Image (cartoon, rainbow, N blue to C red):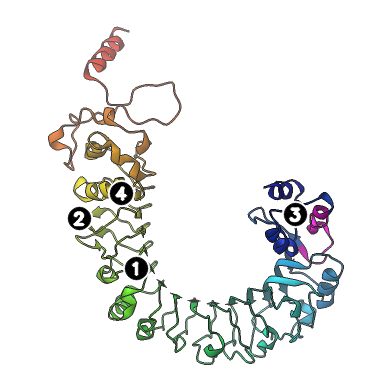
Amino acid sequence: MICVILLQVFGVVSVAEEVILKSSSLLPINAKDLNSVVNICQEDFYPCTCETYSWDLIPSLYVHCNEVPSFESVQAAFRRTTASQVKEFVLTIPSFEENKTIPANLLSGKAAQEITLICPNTETQLTVDPKAFNFSEDYTNFIKFSTCDLNQLDYTFLTNFNVLKEISYFNSNNFSQWYGLPSLPSLMKISVDSSSDFKDFKNLAVSKLPALSEYSIRLCPHFELLPNTTATKKLRIESCPLFKEWDIVGRQSRLTSLSLISLNNQTIENALDSIVSSSVVNTLAELILTYNGLTQVPSQIQLFSQLQNVTLSDNNISTAGNRSLAFSTPKLQRLYLNRNGLSHFESEAFQGDFSVCQVLLGSNNLTKLESSVFKSVLEQMDATDIGSFTVDKNPFECDCDLAWIFRDNLHLRDQIKDGKCTNGSYFAELGPKNFAYCNEETNTSTTVTSSTIQSTTIPSTDTASRPFQLLDPVLFLIILFISISV
């Protein structure tokens, strides 16, 4: 606790001290030791910039070299500064060094946890000296190539990078030869984003990557083929219209997370038909199907026995039909249905155990919550006080159709989050008095007459948002009499 307070008071420590601080957090620290690690960003990293961010539990250095005249100027900046490690190092290849090899010992004996190499344009041939980042071997866990032509790249410079967990490519081309790729025992993820020519992983030596289990492929119009492996645990395919190898996906017996985004309705149907006939139906815990133009909840979802998180947001599902949300999974945790234009649930739409599920219905067109649809589910949620419906940004009319909640079952109100009426009243403010004059026989009617509910509000000097007030008839007559008399 003393260490944390001192760090907050004195400012920034370098990533170089992270291991020391973590291992000695229970030991006393004196002012001399503290002064040796604080305010590192006040050193002169020019022509690079140095930043720290408040969200880091232990303040770390983010060094960006985006407008530097030469590789030597970067080496000089790291030579004259004392931090032995930085959290992030970003280099934009200098225009005068374009198509030249990044030299050995670029960071002058220092190490970077995350490395990003950015080329001026996709015609720039990136090459890296085998010893360019030799002091980062046991520290770097992420490396990214952006806007480069990687046709000449020799991956030998990653030799002995034993803690590297992810390689990422953004808007880069000709990288799928993976020439000289060494054994990377900790590499778990490969990400490819916005590559116009990337087609497949057929040249990737997966035998050298025993931990590789996650692929994220997005905005790659020619991508067609995954590696011939069964070790994939997480897969994201986004805006890759030529990818059709769903049988390969079905062979991933360890797959727990699948994201299929910005494809189309028919592609999703084909994908799910193939996957539910495989062993993945019993392993998948997360399914994300956003921006696919879906007009109904895919029926295949009901067959996945281990689902915990389901995302169907940003589609065109205006109605949830009977049993469309019937899950065989024992404990669904999150169901996202945001931004669908959803306006109606049939009475038996929800089937299964939703007791610990967060159901997100924000930014839809719901005007009411029918008791025949929601009551039994809310009772499940109330029993655990974990599950809930989040219903922000829906045009709820808040008429007598909601009396079943706020007058007859007020204990269920807390399981409905962020509800707001079109008249400005918040669900959290509504109670029995607001629905006292609703006719019990017509509570569930979709039509509410003026004799059933008054929408006039009681005048108030309080400027805070309040629920609408239903006027007592006697009080109304008194006010009317006074007004006429005056």
Residue type of the residue flagged with mark 3: Val
The residue that label 4 is drawn on is 381
| Label 1 residue SS | loop
The residue that label 1 is drawn on is 293
Residue located 79% across and 83% down the image: 104
Whether 281 is drawn above or below 345: the answer is below
CA separation in Å, label 3 and label 2: 56 Å
Residue type of the residue flagged with mark 2: Glu
- Sequence order check, earlier mark of 2 and 4: 2
Whether label 4 touches label 1, CB < 8 Å: no
Q: Which mark is residue 12?
A: 3
304 falls in the magenta region: no
CA separation in Å, label 2 and label 4: 20 Å
Whether label 1 touches label 2, CB < 8 Å: no
Residue lying furthest front: 27
Q: Which mark is residue 346?
A: 2
CA separation in Å, label 4 and label 1: 30 Å
- Sequence order check, earlier mark of 3 and 2: 3
For disc 1, the neighbor class at 10 Å (few under 14, some 14 to 19, many from 20) is: some
